């Protein structure tokens, strides 16, 4: 088990999936959120985007972080070809996103930031996800029923669409849910070593 001493861990995320996954690691934490501008330069590609967003979400707390606090922030993106898929803004966009992913392999990349008053460490994890062919009727059913508007790529692997559409993955399942638990545990241990 990880000994957080002298820190208390703050998870800066509204995501219920991140709350659930961090609880599963049996690491005590409290939640503190702050709205952050999540726009980024088009020059950023692939993992650079996820790491940049995790970094700026953490840095938003710099003016108020206490010496005994460790702020954890994260951001998950879906990457296909040379295009990033963030959260859909509408049902139409969600259906189009999943339709584009259908029958193809994409990457889910989560950037994570560990921030204390005097240092920051940012890393990422990548999982390859292979979607089978899913017809538009099934996609529309999923979007209407599950309303995946808070999810990168417009889907949750742990929901109905994951059951019927995901053929296989290479990498961390939990990363696709939005938080790379195993890599986080290792990186946090390293970060806490004097």
Image (cartoon, grey):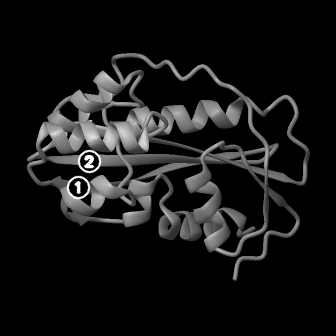
The residue that label 1 is drawn on is 129
64 sits left or right of 129 in the view = right
Whether 193 is drawn above or below 55: the answer is below
64 sits left or right of 99 in the view = right
Q: How many labels does the image show?
A: 2
- Residue shown at 78% from the left, 76% from the top: 3
- Residue shown at 74% from the left, 31% from the top: 34
How many C-alpha atoms fall within 10 Å of the one at disc 1: few (<14), some, or many (≥20)?
many
Judged from the image, the secondary structure of the residue bearing numbered disc 2 is strand
Whether 105 is drawn above or below 3: the answer is above
Residue 94 in view in this figure: yes
View extreme (bottom): residue: 1
Judged from the image, the secondary structure of the residue bearing numbered disc 1 is strand
Whether 64 is drawn above or below 74: the answer is above
Task: Look at the numbered discs 1 and 2 and tell me whether their residues touch, using CB distance below 8 Å.
Answer: yes
First in sequence: mark 1 vs mark 2: 2
| Residue 177 % position (x, y) | 44, 56
Residue 47 in view in this figure: no
Q: Nearer the viewer, residue 191 or 31?
A: 31
18 sits left or right of 95 in the view = right
Whether 159 is drawn above or below 52: the answer is below
Q: Which of 163 and 34 is in front in this view?
A: 163
Which of the 4 image quarters holds residue 83? Answer: top left
How many C-alpha atoms fall within 10 Å of the one at disc 2: few (<14), some, or many (≥20)?
many
The residue that label 2 is drawn on is 107
| Residue 179 % position (x, y) | 51, 56
On residue 3, the disc is none
Q: Nearer the viewer, residue 116 or 150?
A: 150
| Residue 105 % position (x, y) | 15, 49
């Amino acid at each position: 088990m990880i000994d957080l001493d002298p820190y208390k861990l703050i998870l800066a995320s509204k995501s219920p999936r991140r709350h659930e996954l961090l609880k599963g690691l049996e690491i005590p934490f409290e939640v503190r959120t702050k709205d952050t501008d999540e726009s980024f330069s088009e020059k950023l590609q692939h993992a650079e985007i996820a790491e940049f967003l995790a970094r700026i979400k953490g840095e938003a707390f710099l003016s108020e972080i206490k010496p005994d606090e460790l702020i954890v922030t994260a951001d998950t993106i879906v990457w296909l070809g040379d295009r990033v898929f963030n959260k859909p803004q509408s049902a139409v966009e969600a259906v189009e996103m999943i339709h584009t992913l259908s029958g193809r392999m994409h990457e889910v990349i989560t950037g994570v930031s560990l921030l204390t008053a005097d240092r920051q460490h940012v890393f990422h994890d990548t999982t390859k996800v292979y979607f089978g062919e899913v017809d538009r009727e099934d996609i529309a059913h999923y979007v209407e029923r599950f309303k995946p508007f808070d999810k990168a790529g417009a889907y949750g692997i742990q929901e109905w669409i994951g059951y019927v559409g995901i053929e296989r993955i290479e990498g961390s399942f939990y990363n696709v849910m939005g938080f790379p638990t195993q890599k986080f545990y290792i990186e946090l241990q390293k970060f806490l070593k004097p």
